[in-house]
Image: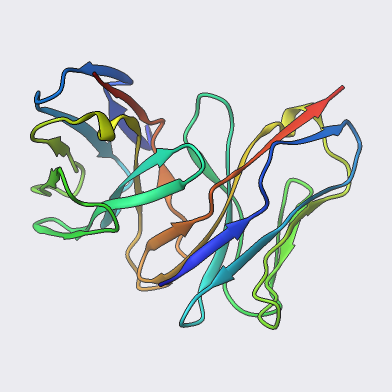
Amino acid sequence: GDSVTQMEGPVTLSEEAFLTINCTYTATGYPSLFWYVQYPGEGLQLLLKATKADDKGSNKGFEATYRKETTSFHLEKGSVQVSDSAVYFCALSDSGNKLVFGAGTILRVKS
Amino acid sequence: NAGVTQTPKFQVLKTGQSMTLQCAQDMNHEYMSWYRQDPGMGLRLIHYSVGAGITDQGEVPNGYNVSRSTTEDFPLRLLSAAPSQTSVYFCASSYSSGDRGETQYFGPGTRLLVL
């Protein structure tokens, strides 16, 4: 079945550092890919998405490119802030609205 | 718009007790779903509904029941709680356009502890 693998955390960075969170997927079809973010004590909210190969999703300085050849959707940000501290989930949708999530990566940004 | 709301925020149950987790949305979304979040496992789909009167099982449906009598509400029932059901439960909703790229809107979650 479909699956998503993302790098284990926690990832601890200093403010203004470059961020990469790796995400790879396995799917039988051509899924849409998502990054959701969960801030402390809150539910998940969409950060960005891409619906076909070579699409780049971007939002709030974060970006990720749908790479079909490497089945990847890595999340990047050039300069993280303390307010970016959260749990980041990579997910795919290959059937209707159902989402398959990765395990999540905790990001801690220190000032 | 309140978005997706869930009650209660936190609940403690004893093994064997039953309870209903409430979920409501005011965005007129056809699609609603329940996920559970466990450490190191991300979120896993329990049940989902594509419209009033229509429900189906997700990845981990055992021990849970759902029904969808209105577009707005999608309650999750635990018939006989077990410690393995200790988790954080999230309800989500979206339009059901058939587009796999639809954004899901999540509620704030219900933290459940089964003793």
The quarter holding residue A15 reads top right
- Asked which colour scheme the image uses, the reply is rainbow
Question: Percent x, y for residue B62?
Answer: 17, 49
The C terminus of chain A: image quadrant: top right
The quarter holding residue A33 reads bottom right
Where is B102 relative to B85, above or below? below
Residue lying at 57% horizontally and 72% vertically, measured from the top left: A51
B31 or A39: nearer the eye? A39
B50 or A74: nearer the eye? A74
Where is A48 relative to B98, above or below? above
Residue lying at 83% horizontally and 38% vertically, measured from the top left: A80
Q: Is residue B2 left or right of residue B65?
A: right
Residue lying at 33% horizontally and 21% vertically, measured from the top left: B9
Count of numbered circles in the view: 0
Question: Percent x, y for residue B11?
Answer: 26, 18
Q: Is residue B73 left or right of residue B8?
A: left
Question: Percent x, y for residue B77?
Answer: 13, 37
Where is B111 relative to A66, above or below? above
* Residue at the outermost right position: A16
